[in-house]
Each structure stands twice: as structure tokens, then as C-alpha cells.
Image: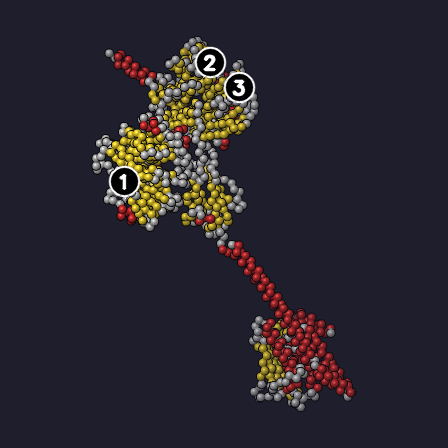
Amino acid sequence: MLRKPLLLACLLYCTRLLAQQNLEFAPSFRNYSTDQGLPQNWVYNILQDRKGYIWVSTNLGVCRFNGYSFEQFPDTLFSNLTSVMTGAMAEDSRGRMWYVDFQARVFYIEDGIIHPYAYNSVIEAQKGPTDFYHGLMLEGAGEELWLVNNNGGKVLHLWGKGEFEHVKHPETSRFHLFEKNGKYQLAFQSLLDVLVDTITVTFNQDGIIQTLDLKAPDYNNAIGGWFASSIRKDGWLLCVSGKVYFIQAGKLVWMDSTLQRPQAVWVENNGALLVGYVNGGLSSYKSLDDFRAHKPDAHYLSNLSVSQIMRDREGGYWIGTQQQGIFYCPALSIGGAVQIPALTGKNVASVAYDGANKLFAGTEDAQLVEIDLKNKKWRDLPPSGNNFLRSLTYEPSNQTLVACGDPNSFYENGRWSRFYTWNSERTYTGKLSSYSLCFSREDQSWFSASRFNLTKFSLHKPLELTFLSKRDQNLRFYAVLKASNGRVWASCAKGLLEWKTGTGLQAPEFEHPAFKQISLDIAELPDSSLVFCPKGFGVVLWKPGTTEVTVIGKNKGLSSERVYALHVTKEGVIWACTNGGLDKISPIGPNQYRVDNYTVQHGLPSNTVNDVVVVGNDVWVATLKGLFRMEQNLPAVSIPAPIFPKILVNNTLYSSESLRALPHDSANLVITYLSLYYRSNGEIPYRIRLLKPGNDTAWTYTKQIQVYFSNLRPANYQFEAQAQDENGIWSPSSRLAFTIRPPWWATRWAIGLFALGIGLGIFGLFRYRTNVLLRESRLKEEMLRLERSALQAQMNPHFIFNCLNSIQHFILKNDVDSAVQYLASFAKLVRGTLNASVEGSILLEDEVNMLNNYLSLEQLRFKAAFQYHIEVDPALDREHTLLPPLIAQPFVENAVLHGMKDLKKDGLLQIKFYPDKGMICVEVSDNGPGLRPEKSNGTGISLGRNITRRRIELLNEQSKQKEISLTYSTPESGRGTTVLIRLPIQQTHPISNDATKLENAHH
């Protein structure tokens, strides 16, 4: 009784194995939802602006995506808490984004701030009780607006200062396809309020409104879903509640009521279509005819409502849904993850190609499938019996698929077999397990690298098992290769070794550090060079017989230096499977190679790549998370140069234009830079530098999108940034030039003014000093002149004649003593006067002696008609006190000539020298007739006094105190005259005074 159910189960299992299923691919979509910062998962519209930003309208307002994060802007009117419908977002000519919220309010975003439209009150007044606007069209920078709603199919046109009109179309039409500047919106009114057999559609054709009557859909079977899309020139798809109409040149071409309800269409340049459905996901069609025939080429995102499809300037696809936000795919055409249950999301260990039409893939736990590439079918293979799968190898010469692992299994003629090892006594020892196998077509044998030894065996002759590493038993081997020249190479814990008949394992003929490391795979290039992957070295190329070794590591662009497997094409291209992605190493010259990287940014399910094979233009990649197919030649896309969205100077926001000239205290600068390149998923390498005077202009490499500069000095700067794509190609440079101005006192004009001021100051000081010196020189010259004049005044001819006459008189009287005395006094007076006229000052002692000599002569001349007294206060040091020369002599002479002139006797002349408050006072008094007007008769009497007065004025000009004075007074008795001269006390050094005395004594 149990045999029948068991037999039935076996038959069902075999049927499943033999059944082939369609081969499908799922592009590697990247999902952005509220988990990544999207405001709401219900997405209506997706646009890319002229800068490259992605704008998204959702059920909770508008946001902007920069590749790193979603930005919502400061909102004081709560516009980002209401819906922004599918067509209610548009960019104006100035790059500002406009949108209409669900409350029929218009806003625009500029410099990160939301601004309300100036005439929202006009829109509010025209809005019906249930109106909302689902469409917005702009002219220029918002000078004209057109708002489209679903209440009666109205189009509201606004311009100027709140002026408006309703765009007219036939009142009978339920749908109006309004077109402006190559863009269009569908205005419609509800059809549920009245049952009709036909619906009227109006549309603009060459500026003329045309009308078309269509059969109305069955509203009992399909509700909602009004949609229109431009398919080709003058061709439109119109979807109304589940019925699809194709209209071209104003005529209905075909109508289909069996299609699902589409609500988004994207038309490729080659005519292919991407169609998004309500709760039906996304389908691709090769043509409009396939769409009409219900023949999708592929289907994605099942059970989701696709509301928007947009392709960016990189060729990436943005799919908006009403349940899970946005799905992004770099390029649908490059392939996708293989949709096979045994492989989906599994660790696919290996993939093999039979060289014709079949591909084999297996997971780490030995679930194996066969893929028919020609017919795009797949089927499960029977269990191989492997506990663990390391690699798959297909040998075309005997059409054998080998599952290398624990144990090894061989698939021939539709069944699996295993190889059992025997010892020399034909005793069974176990199943053969290997890390790697390679086939020798010369003797139809296999080489096995296992964890215990290196062996050679024949699949159909079990007794021909040969241990090639007898001296190295229990040595772990990882890879083995029989080269085209017959040489056998193996990798073990000792590194790279060669096996030779008779001598066993030997190291290469010369040493290299890469030869000492474990390699997990060994391959051969068309020129017989070896390619292997030592740990820590990446990929190494070496041609046996030479000493030239080429190492390709991360420094040359390799994703990782941890390489798991290698695949070499007949063109010599090396594919390296790493834990950082898949690398394509292409020769471009002698010992020169280009490295292209393929990672999750290209859609790979995982960056851990276990194996790869190339079939034509397709690359099949076994990864940690499934099997992936991609085209070898990906669409070339240049990464855009970075932009500078945010610049802060001392925590103040600046634009790139206002940044050009900064004040001197702008020492702290924060620059945000980013490339709007969405393939890299926010993992973009940048290099930046700040060019300034004296800088070495070295690049700084980083993945940060912000840089901080502190303590910048005044100078001209240029900040430069570049972004790198996934292939290692750098974008054009973006440059931000700015100048930190010096403080006003350090500017050229200020420095020039300072220099001019200093120059003028120096010149003024020079002129002032020159004038002072000239003035002092003039003063000195005038003083000397006055002193000479004083001398002349004192030594006037009349006085000299009188003196000589007196001497003659004494000689004639034979009064020799008096004559000698008179002559000696006269000689002393003349000599003293001459000395005084040469020196700028004389000692008080000399002044007193000169006065004594003069008065003694005058006393003799006037026959003793007067007496004189010279008093010097003891407080004055006669030997060290200085006086201007001949300062008192004119007044003494004046007192003698005028005061004593009419006296026969009892004349008295007194001369006093005394100190007073730091001054020396010279007082000359007589008892003559007193002061009376003088006549300038040219005799020099009043002239000497005037000369002295002028000398006192000049001395005052030279003195800082300016306290030198000359005063005349009359005693209380009413007779006589008193002259008082006040002079500053000047002292001379005692030595100088002694020297003067010695000089005078010598003379």
C-alpha cells in the first residue's frame, strides 16, 4: 500500500526536475522610504531640476533629494503637511521649484525657503467647494500660471498682478488635454455623477481645440484611474477607469478594456515602454504593439501601485509608488538578479558555462540549477550528494559537470557519480574531496587540490590514483592548474609550487614575496602567463621563465586585495572576484592595465563575489546574495562636477556670488560640496584642495561632503573639488573663487596713504628741522651781528678818541704812572671786549672785570664826577656762572653818558648781580636826571640800548621758558633810572672754566 504514494512522490519530484521554467530577472532596486527620510511613502511625482536635484511630491508635501538625504525646507504655512498631486509641481526659468498643495495654495522654493505665491487669495476666490488642483504649468519665472483641476475640467490662467481667466473648452467634454510649450495636463470632471454612453475628449492640435467622442467605460468594473501620456508624435494614451485609448492625429486608433489600470508611462527613445499599474507593479514592453498585445518583457515590483516613472540624466530609473516610497535602479538594461528560488538571496558559490547554451550555478549548500540561455529557461538539477560546494567546473570534451567540494561529484548523462579512493590492497578509504579540480585532456585525468594532498586520478579508472605530494602529506592545497604547455602549478600553505614528474613539488626558479602566499585560484593568460591571487597582493601576473612580476592591488584600482576566484577570457581580460566587488582588468599596453569596478552601486546584490563567467556580452556573477547577470559593456555615464549647495562664513549663510569678496574677519569657512550622482548611493570619493599663495596645491581625498577652514588670512583663494565615479574616473573640477579682504588699514590705498603721510611727515619734519636750523642760524647770525654792533657801539670813535686823548694828556703832563694805568685799563677793556664778541657767552667774573675797566676809564675821563659800585651776591658763583656777552655794558654806558653827563660831582652808579627764583638779575641804577625821551641822533647811545633790547628778544625766542626781560623804573626819590635785566642762570663746567682762565692767562 505504501509503494504507490512513494512512487507518485518520486514521479512528481522527477517531473519538477525535468520541468523548465521561464528565466526572469529582478533589477537591483534601491528603496527610499520614510526610513531614509522621505516625508511620506505615498509618492505622486518625481522631477529632476536643471542642477540635478531629484524633487519628490508626496502626500505630505515636497522634498528634495541630493543623493545623501531628503531635504524639506522651513515652512511657516504648513504647506508640507498636505498633498502635492501628480502634476502639481514645476520648475521655472530661474530654477525655482513651484507646487500647489491640496488646499489650492501655490508656493515656490528659492534658496532653501518656501515662499507663498503673491495672489493665492485670487486662487482661493476661484476655487470651488471641493476643488483641488492636480496640475501646474508655468511660463518664464512664474509670470504666468495655469492650474488644472478635476471639477468641471477647469484650467485657471493667472498673470500680471492677480489677473485671471478660465481657459475655455467645449462644455460637453469630460476631458480636456491642455498643452502649453510642449507640456500637457489632463483636466477632467467626475463621471460618476451621471451615466453616459460616451465621453468627449478635447485636445490641442496645432493650437486648435479638437473634439473626440469615445465609448465610456464600465464604471461598475473599474473605478478611478484617469491618466494621459504622450507616446509618440501627436500620439496619446488615455486611461479612464480601466479602459485604455490610443489617440493619434485626433483619431482613436485602438481601445482596450482588458488591460490593468495604468497610471504612469515612460517611453524610451527606442519606443519601449515602462508602464506602472494600480496595484499591479511595473511592466516593461518592447513596443506599443506589445503593450496592446499584453506581452510584457519583464515585470517588477509586483502588487505595488506605481504612480510615477522618471529617468534621470544618468539613465537611472526612479519609480514612485503609493505604498513603499521610491525605487531606484541605475539601469534596467544592465541585467538583474536571477529569479530562481534555489538561488534567490542565497550564497551562490560558483557558476560554470558549457561553452554553448547552458549555464550551471550552485549554492554553498549544493542546490544546483541548469539555465538554458538560448530559450531563457531554467530547471533544477538532481541532488549531487555534496554536503558542501566550493566550485563548479564543466569539461566540454567529455561533457562532464564537476561539483567540487565535500565530496566531489560528477554529472554525466543525466546522473551524478562520485569517486571513491582505494589503497594498494584495494581497500576502500573514502570519498575524494577537493578545493579545486582541473582537467588534463592529454590523458583524460583530473588534478585535485585537497586539504591533505595534491592528487591525480582518472574518473573511469579508480585504481589510477596518484599522490603527487608524497613528501608533503597533510599539506593543504587550494588551487591547481595544468597550463597549456603541460606544466602543473599548485598553491598550498607554502605558496606557489610547480609539480614535475620524478622530482615532485618545487618552488619557482626565483623568489618573490607573492610566491610565498596562499592563492585561492590560478589561471592562465593567452600568452601562457600565470595569473594568481596571493593573499595581500591582489592579482599577480608572471610568465614562467622570466623575472618580471606585475602586481595589481588597491593602489592600481582593485576593489580589494582579498581575491576569491579568477576568470580569464580569450581576449586576455581578467575578472577578479573579491570581497569588495567584481573587478575587470583589461590590458591597454605593455604591463599596463585598466581596472573597472562593479559593486552594489551597479546593482550587484552583494559586494562579496564568489565566482564569475562571461558569456558573450553578459557577465554572470555568483554573489553572497544570489546570482546576478549584467551586460559587460555598461552605458557610459560621466559623473557631474560637484556643486556647492551651502557655504557658511562665521556661521552666516553665503551664496557663491556673495562669497567673492569677504571682510577681513571671515576667518572660519565651511563649504558643503556634493556631486548629484545617484548611482553611488552617497558613497562618492572626492578630492579637494584650497589654492592660495604659497600653497603646494596637494589634493585631499575624502568621502565627506563638507570641509572646514579656520584662521584664513586675507588673500585670494580658490577652492577646487572633484568627484570620482565607480570606475575611478574623476569628474571635471568645480571651483569656488573668493577673496578675504584685508582690514582697511592693510589695504593698498590705506598703506599708500600711510606711506604718503609718513613721507609728508618726514618731509615736514625735515622742513621744520631745516627751518629751525635756518632760524637758529639766522638768530646766531643776528646775535653775532648785534654783538658786533654792541662792540661797535661800545667802541665808538668818540670813546676811543677820548681814551687816547686822555692817555696823550697824561703823557704830555709827564704823568707816566697815570698814563700807564690808563693805557693798561684801556688795553684790558679792548681785549675783553674782543673776546666777548667771539664767544657766545662770558663768565660773570669776566663781565664784572670788563665793567670795572670801562667804568674806571670813564671815571678818569669824567674827572671823578661819579662813583660806581659793582656788587655780586655771594650766592652766585663768579667762576661758573655764564652771561650773554656785553649784555649790561650798553646800559652802564648809557647811565654814564646820560646820567652822569651834567654832574660835576656826587654822581653814583650802582651795578648789582643777584639770583631770584632761578634767574640772575642784573640791575643798573644811577642818580642822574632820570628817564627822558631819547633822540636817535646816530651817535650809538640809544642804538646800543636798542641792540641789547633786540638781543634780549632773540634770547627769548631761543629760550623755552621765555622769561628773559628788560624793565626800566624810576626810584621813589624821583631821580635816576634803574634798569633790571632778568636772565636764566647758566652754569659752566669747572674744568672748562679753568681752561678759559689758563687761556686768558696765557694771552
Secondary structure category for the residue under label 3: strand
- Determine the CA span between mark 1 and mark 2: 85 Å
- Determine the CA span between mark 1 and mark 3: 93 Å
Residue 408 coordinates in the image, percent (x, y): 41, 17
Specify which label sits upstream in the sequence, 1 or 2. 1
Q: Is residue 366 left or right of residue 793?
A: left
Residue 337 coordinates in the image, percent (x, y): 37, 27
- Residue drawn 50% across the image and 52% down it: 742
Residue 581 coordinates in the image, percent (x, y): 43, 29
The mark total stands at 3
Query: Which quadrant would residue 190 be assigned to in this image?
Result: top left
Q: Are marks 1 and 3 in contact (CB under 8 Å)?
A: no
Closer to us: 793 or 272: 272
Query: Which quadrant would residue 29 be assigned to in this image?
Result: top left
Question: Is residue 918 shown above or below 285?
Answer: below
Label 2 neighbour load within 10 Å: few <14, some 14-19, many 20+: some
Does residue 94 appear in the picture of this structure? yes
Quarter containing the C terminus? bottom right
Closer to us: 769 or 718: 718
Q: Which residue is mark 2?
A: 445
* Dot 1 amino acid type: Pro
Quarter containing the N terminus? top left
Nearest to viewer (mark 1 / mark 2): 1
Secondary structure category for the residue under label 2: strand
Q: Which residue is mark 1?
A: 170
Residue 511 coordinates in the image, percent (x, y): 55, 24
Question: Is residue 743 shown above or below 190?
Answer: below
Closer to us: 850 or 6: 6
Q: Which residue is mark 3?
A: 506
* Dot 3 amino acid type: Gln
